[in-house]
Amino acid sequence: MTTFGKPLQAVETGIPGLVLWELPVHGDNRGWFKENWQHEKMVAAGLPDFGPVQNNISFNDAVGTTRGIHAEPWDKWVSVAAGRIFGAWVDLREGPTFGAVFTAEIDPSRAIFVPRGVGNSYQTLEADTAYSYLVNDHWSPAASYTFLNLADETAAIAWPIPLADVEISAKDLAHPRLADVTPMAPRKTLVVGANGQLGRALRAELGDAAHVEYATRDELDLTSPALATARRWRDYGTIVNAAAYTAVDLAETPAGRTDAWAANVTAVAALARVATAHGITIVHVSSDYVFDGTADRPYTEDDPVSPLGVYGQTKAAGDAIVATVPRHYVVRTSWVIGEGKNFVRTMASLAERGIDPKVVDDQVGRLTFTDDLARGIRHLVETGAPYGVYDLTGSGEPASWADVARAVFSLTGHDPARITGVSTEEYFATASGPVAPRPRNSVLDLTRIDATGFRPTDVDTALAAYLRA
């Protein structure tokens, strides 16, 4: 019997992401009414905003009709419009809960959210049962499915009506036992810009897991009109955008300006459209250059942007675009040091060659090493931190570029007094081409990233380790 008057309430099941929902049903002598799917109320109550695109109904004439166990690569909202079922769900995803089982009776006053990769099955307990499910992807023959036999001894589902006495399709009878099931892999992660210094650090951090893909500019053109169909995007859970135009001085030239806007804005907009359309989490790396550097304190994520030059303007525009994606992380960083040519390696080389450089001493910030940045990105995604903007740099005391140079000299066994500090204006006085304006204060506040449980590495510790490598 349908229970009337229950409040909307979520009930955990023991299988991660599989949540049973009690639904308010209002009845009188004419029948009953319920809000079977109400986006605003249900999302506010904790249901994932899973973006259904199709509603299917399976009508079952007889008691005992049994279907499943099917795990599809999409999420489902399962409910009953008429009648009653015994439902059984088995976790068929990779991970520690593989094979976990949950069962429950579902009538019109109950529904259940079934996440991607959890096997779904049911047995009708009343005649003329209408079984309804919303899904967030369209059926495709290219999609990857996982199945489990209804009679699997390991799952040991206690079917109310013995399987020998019910109607089951030949296909369902032929599904494998749990020992022979290939678990459903997680939704894929795509790293764009995989050959850059951050891309290489992400390769090291994320490794060669089967669900992680890396794409270079040659392999995936973000400005191509074909981007929308370049992948089966519903199979992807995360896109990490490690691609960017970072030649800040060259961006001040006519050709550089065009290239900077193409890479940092046009391409980002294309990725944002894909992420929004397919419910993908996008991770976008931003820069301290979105600020003008005039603040007398560290910049927070909520400070208004005020970029000085073309590079900073394109990064600020990209941030604004990514912020429109429902699932997004904008990771602002500064003074990035990774594999390949960079400021730290240059200073170490000058020290070894006996050259005493002049280095800017009126720009202050913190170094960020790419391994730390990659580790922080992974942390945000895997812990499900609240979406939004995060500052992520090395921790510890801010320093000027001249201070960093002196530390490099000292750590490599050279006299730090060989460094001469100069102003930005003096340093660029003899430049032969355009010079981008730099923020004088590039210090970013780390309070928000700290609150997620991530601890950025102290810059002094990281610098010493980098030079030893």
Image (cartoon, helix red, strand yellow):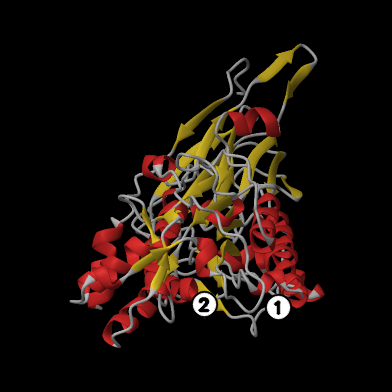
Q: Residue at x 51, y 66 (%)?
A: 426
* Residue ID for mark 2: 196
Q: Residue at x 25, y 78 (%)?
A: 469
Q: Residue at x 56, y 59 (%)?
A: 438
Against 152, is 158 above or below?
above
Q: Secondary structure at mark 2?
A: loop
The residue furthest top is 29
- Answer whether residue 82 is visible to the viewer in this image: no
If you read the primary sequence from the N terminus, does the residue marked by circle 1 or circle 2 appear first?
Answer: 2
How far apart are the alpha carbons under marks 1 and 2?
15 Å
Quarter holding residue 237 = bottom right
The residue closer to the viewer here, 354 or 122, is 354
Which-is-in-front pick, marks 1 and 2?
Answer: 2
Against 239, is 88 above or below?
above
Indicate the position of residue 57 as horizontal and vertical percent values. 74, 46
Looking at the rendered image, the quarter that the N terminus falls into is top right
Indicate the position of residue 395 as horizontal and vertical percent values. 33, 51
Indicate the position of residue 270 as horizontal and vertical percent values. 74, 64
Indicate the position of residue 379 as horizontal and vertical percent values. 40, 54
How many dots with numbers?
A: 2
* Residue ID for mark 1: 221
- Answer whether residue 104 is visible to the viewer in this image: yes
